[in-house]
Amino acid sequence: MWPVLAQEGRGSADRAEALRVRLEHADGRLHRRLRAAVQAGQGPALFRRWLEASPATPAGEGYDALDELVAGLLRLAEPGTGGPALEPGMVFYQPTPARHVLDMLARVRLAPRDVLVDLGSGLGHVPMLASLCTGARALGVEWQESHVTVARAAARALRLARVTFVAGDARDADLSAGTVFFLYTPFVGAVLRQVLDALHAEGRRRPIRVCTFGPCSPLVAREAWLRADGPATADRVVVFQAVRQRSD
Ligand SMILES: C[S@@+](CC[C@H](N)C(=O)[O-])C[C@H]1O[C@@H](n2cnc3c(N)ncnc32)[C@H](O)[C@@H]1O
């Protein structure tokens, strides 16, 4: 290669690297400021704007820059390995893309008396974002203890006192406090059937809503006791209202 071209190439690579480092520092500063605001209890005032700015129809299951921002805000550690393996019907961990969590929160409008329960809460994004953006109480139930350990540490570090995590099987969970339940296709088959029956029993006792995302949505839409707020497609959160039936 001509020496002058090689030098120019090196020059652009150096400039690109310098820009990358500056952007990383700027990201780090933004994450620290957001975390400090949440720790000071200013989350709902600050993040209400996120809900208002949530796009009208967020589509698709992929991740985007908002997930990067949320990762910097929540600073979740890598979960350890070990603990009980997933049983048949249980779905492995994958977080709901942040824009869909915000879309759900914008649509359900959690009131102070609401309690959001994420069934199969993984590393805890959904309960933490719900509480952080609205101040509401939120609970996560998760089979994998290693994930619950990470979620609890992250909530503690952000001083999210209204968020709790329970390690265990959603089939055995105490659902009595919940008013809004979220399922990002955490299980299928007989496990899903049992949890839906448990939710139906809760819905007979008090008004509840069930929000779903992913492939479980069309399955949940077959429940006669649930009324969807729109088409039950897999690529957008569906909000179901429990309705009283003649047999209830
Ligand atoms: C697709 S991930 C959803 C994670 C989280 N809800 C989110 O949206 O970020 C499904 C999670 O459900 C958990 N899970 C599967 N079966 C479960 C069960 N019976 N009880 C509790 N958690 C379960 C898995 O360990 C996994 O973390």
Image (spheres, rainbow, N blue to C red):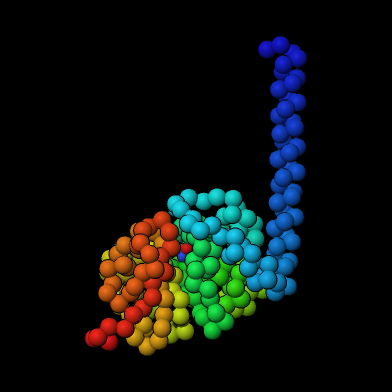
In percent of width and height, residue 21 lies at: 73, 42
Residue at the extreme left of the image, as rendered = 247
The answer to whether 244 appears left or right of 28 in the picture is: left
Residue 120's x, y, as percent? 43, 68
Quadrant the N terminus occupies: top right
Q: Residue at x 74, y 21 (%)?
A: 8
Locate residue 200, reporting x and y percent: 33, 80
Above or below, comparing residue 115 to residue 239 in the picture:
below
Which image quarter: residue 221?
bottom left
Residue 178 in view, yes or no = yes
11 vs 60, nearest the viewer: 60
Give the residue at the far top of this rendering: 2
Q: Could you tell me which residue is drawn at 38 percent across and 72 percent down?
A: 240
View quadrant of ligand 1: bottom left
Residue 67 at what x, y percent from top left?
A: 57, 55
Q: Which quadrant of the view contains residue 233?
A: bottom left
Q: What number of labels is visible?
A: 0
Quadrant position of the C terminus in the picture: bottom left
Q: Is residue 123 above or below residue 66?
A: below
The residue lying at 43 percent from left, 59 percent from top is 236
Q: Work out whether residue 158 can be spotted.
A: no
Which picture quadrant has residue 23?
Answer: top right
